[in-house]
Image: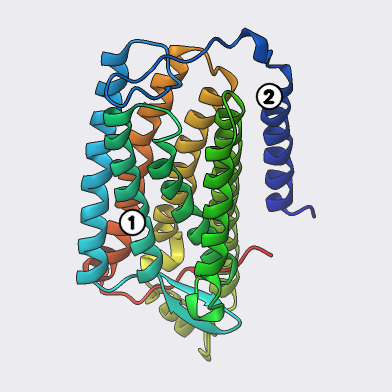
Amino acid sequence: MIDIRYITSFFFLILFGGVFFSFLAIDISNFSSPKNDTLTGFQKLTRFNEETWYSMIGFTSILKIVSGVFMFIWSFKYTTLNVFIYNGEKASTTFFNKLLAGCSIVTGIAGISLIIVDLGTLWTISGVIHNYFEVIIIILLQQGGNRAANNNIHLYSIIYLLIAEDVTILLQWPYNAFWFLFQGLSVDWVFFIQFIRLYFTTKRHYREDYISLPLNASSDNESETEEHDLPDHHKKGNHLNHVLLLPFAAFCHIVGNVLFTIFLKEAFACYLFGFSYGFTFPSLAFFVYLDTHLRQINQKSLFSYLTPLF
């Protein structure tokens, strides 16, 4: 039977390829010189209603920062429900939750800085930090959620940061804009696919673990009693639903990025891009909340198998 993960990965690979080739259809000669930002006098990349744009960015930036602060509080204050399991070793999701919190806060700060200096090369200095946190999360998931498994996690992410931002600074308009969009979109796609596969891997391992639970009863009545005593979440798998918040949040983010990339000159697509963040980071905050509070609510020790993807 064909694994649904491979079908999903192939589908999104084709979709990403379509977005990539949409760059080839862009006639660069039709792009006029960008306006200058009123504060710095530097070139900016936007040409639409500034009040609507700033209002959208300001609103979602507040949501990001507030979500990140609460995620940090919950991560430090409470014990997590989930653990990463890799090669028989368990690692708490606490560091993972803190990375989500950091990503949320720095993205909110990038939004505030966008209002101050507008969307230009100067802004990318703060904007690239959002992708930097995504890269750390991607690498962390790749090594089974255990940061001790590879001490080079920060080295790899710093290398990405230097390449992404240095190329953006050195290129001239409009190539710097295309490069920054492309590298950011690539990271966002990997981020999304990681969460999609993480959910299906978690679901599969959880189901296999439930099926293989030892029932040592000597009679049918004892067997029924033992299964009856299992937590309701083991029977229904309801606690897996909150893991679905991760790919949902990444999906909202990637939709906004795709619209912004394909319809680069459409103001409405840019507004939707900003609005998508209003769903992304509150959803991640809700995941962290459930991850740190479900144990206290249900008084059960439940583990999700958040495993590496390859």
Q: Element at badge 1?
A: helix
Marks 1 and 2 sit apart, C-alpha to C-alpha, by 31 Å
- Compared across the picture, whether 138 is left or right of 127 comes to right
Residue at the spot 30% in from the left edge and 42% down from the top edge: 108
* Amino acid type at mark 2: Phe
Q: Horizontal and vertical percent for residue 299?
A: 25, 74
* Amino acid type at mark 1: Gly
Q: Is residue 306 visible?
A: no
- Compared across the picture, whether 150 is left or right of 246 comes to right
Q: Horizontal and vertical percent for residue 94?
A: 35, 70
Judging by the rendered image, the residue that carries numbered circle 2 is: 23
Mark number displayed over residue 62: none
Farthest residue, direction right: 1
Q: Residues within 10 Å of mark 2 (few under 14, many from 20)?
A: some
Q: Horizontal and vertical percent for residue 98?
A: 33, 63
Q: Horizontal and vertical percent for residue 309?
A: 64, 63
Depth check, front residue: 39 or 211: 39
